[in-house]
Amino acid sequence: MADVTDATFQSDVVDRSKKVPVVVDLWASWCGPCLALGPILEKVVAATGGRVELAKVDIDTNPAVAQAFAVKSIPAVFALSGGKVIDQFLGAQPESVVQQFVDRLLATAEPSEVDTLVAAGDEASLLAALELEPGHPGAVLALAELYADAGRTDEALALLERIPPSAETRRLAARVRVGGNGAGPGTGPGDDVEERLDALLDQVRNDDGARQEFLDLLELLGPGDPRTLTYRRALTTRLF
């Protein structure tokens, strides 16, 4: 998401839309429906993983953009692709309508250069993708996984710090710290995970490393494993 001004509209919206579709949200701080719609737009666009971008324009401080769109009421939302407006809607809308709006935009979008590089999946392509878009979640995760498989743990963990934490980043980081280039110990039915967790429980209060390893093992077990809840409760008891 980017806050766009009259001065940056050409580069941040028109030119950018030639590489990735852009949703433009025209709003103002005094507009109640705008404040209701904003978080919905942010959520739906964020879920595209960078395949669509959101540009927010405060019409009070950027009247030229509002005039260019001939806006008479807000919120007003426009979709641009290839430098042109291809869809729009007015007024606050429920999430289902916003989702359909973004889905239509995705359906018309050609794969971006970054998406093509990420789809290739090799190290050189992923590095090239990150040169173009350093915080691209798909590229970061794919390259970090390659590094994890190769035992390049420090590089994998450094990459994961580029993007916000998620279930995928937490699990991959846990795998890297615990198992390096493998799935990590203690994740199968016949392994020694319980023995290891029991040993770590005696150290978690005063040993940061032991506590991190304990949490990483639980991350690898996952929420669906009944041992995860049992050992999380045991950890809470030991710490508090």
Image: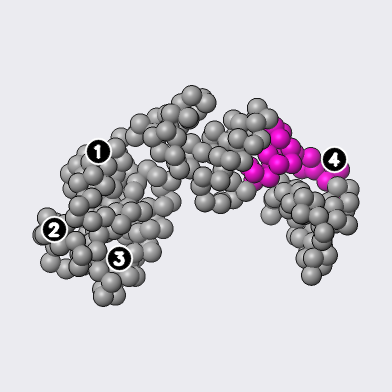
Q: Which residues, given as a range, are shown in magenta? A: 171-194
Residue type pointed to by label 3: Gln
Residue type for callout 2: Ala
How many neighbours does mark 2 have within 10 angstroms: few (below 14), some (14-19), or many (20 or more)? some
Check residue 190 in the rendering and tell me which mark sits there, or answer none: 4
- Between residue 36 and residue 200, name the one nearer to us: 200
Task: Give the mark, 2 or 4, whose residue is nearer the N terminus.
Answer: 2
Label 3 vs 2, first from the N-terminus: 2
Which x, y percent locates residue 69?
14, 56
Q: To which residue does mark 1 refer?
A: 18
Determine the residue positioned at 35% across, 31% down: 113
Identity of the amino acid at label 1? Lys
Where 71 falls versus 120 (above or below)?
A: below
Above or below, 65 relative to 160: below
Sequence order check, earlier mark of 2 and 1: 1
Query: Residue 7 appears at what percent x and percent y?
Result: 20, 52
Mark toward the viewer: 2 or 4: 2
Assign a secondary structure to mark 3.
loop
| Residue that mark 2 sits on | 64
Q: Which mark is residue 93?
A: 3
Q: Nearer the viewer, mark 3 or mark 1?
A: 1
- Residue in front for this viewpoint, 62 or 148: 62
CA gap, disc 3 and disc 1:
27 Å
